[in-house]
Amino acid sequence: MATQTSLPTLWHVPDELWSLIAPLLGPEKALGTPGRPAVPFRRVFDGIVYVLRTGCQWSALPRAEYAPKSTVWGRFQQWAAAGAFQQAWLLVLIYYDLAVGIEWQWQALDGVITTAPLGGEATGPSPVDRAKSGTKRSVLSDGRGAPVAVVAAGAKVPDKTLALETGEMADGLRPEKVGKRVQHLCLDAGYDYDDVIAGMLERDYLLHLKRRREPTPEVPPEQKHPARRWVVEMTQSQTTIFVLRGSRGPKA
C-alpha cells in the first residue's frame, strides 16, 4: 500500500485548529443586538480560506457553502484591522513549539512571487504576469519547514530588501544562543550582499550562503552534508500565507 507523502488540501478549518482561533475573533453578535442571528464565524473563516486557496474573486465565493461575499469580505477587513490573523499565527506557532518544538538549529530563508487574491497594501505589478498584481513573500522557516517569520511586499521588491526585515521579525521568537548551540541559516545566491550578510552575522547566525560569482566547489561524497534549504522552498510551495493589511472589496 502506498504511503501518503503530503497532507490533503485544507478547505475547511479543522476542529482542533478552530478551537484555537475562534476566541481571537470576538463575539459573533453582541448580546442584546436586535435582528437576525449573525452568520457563524466558522463559515466566514472557511470562506476566506476558499478565496485564498482558489485565488478567485470575492464575488465567486459559493454562498450556499460559506457566507455572502460581502459578509466574508467585511469580516476579513474587521479581523485584519484588529490584528486577529497575526495573533492566530503566533498562537499556532506557540502551540507547534509546545507540541513538536521549533527546530531552531537549521533555519532557511527564501522569497517567492505569489498571486494576491485578497489584494492589500503589500502588492504590486508582477514581473512574471504583468496583467495582474502580485506579492513578494519572504519566509524564514525552521528546520522542519514551519514558517517562523513572514514578510510581504510588492512583487518586484528584491529578496535582499526583505531579508533583514524577516530576520528582525524572528528576533523576538528565537532563543538566545547558549554555549555551542549554533543556529545555522541557509541562503541562496539572491542574498549574497554585504548588508544582508552583516545583518545576519549580527544576529549570531552561522551562514551557509551560495555566492553569486563563485563556482560551486566539488565536495567529496563523504564530506557532503544533507540538503537543508529545500524545507523553506517546500513551505513556500505548500503554504497559503496572505497579506493582512487591507483588501479590495467584492464586485457586484
Image (cartoon, helix red, strand yellow):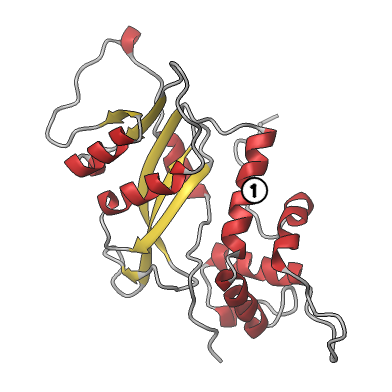
Locate residue 122, reporting x and y percent: 39, 67
The residue under the point 61% across, 31% down is: 101
Q: Residue furthest top?
A: 222
The residue under the point 52% across, 51% down is: 239
Q: Residues within 10 Å of mark 1 (few under 14, many from 20)?
A: some
Q: Quadrant of residue 102?
A: top right
Q: Residue furthest left?
A: 213
Q: Secondary structure at mark 1?
A: helix
Q: Amino acid at mark 1?
A: Val
Where the N terminus falls, by quadrant?
Answer: top right
Locate residue 172, reporting x and y percent: 49, 44
168 left or right, relative to 251: left
Q: Which residue is mark 1?
A: 92
The residue under the point 55% across, 84% down is: 250
Locate residue 104, reporting x and y percent: 49, 30
**In this rendering, is residue 97 above or below 252?**
above
Q: Quadrant of residue 133?
A: bottom left
Can residue 106 be seen by looking at this rendering? Answer: yes
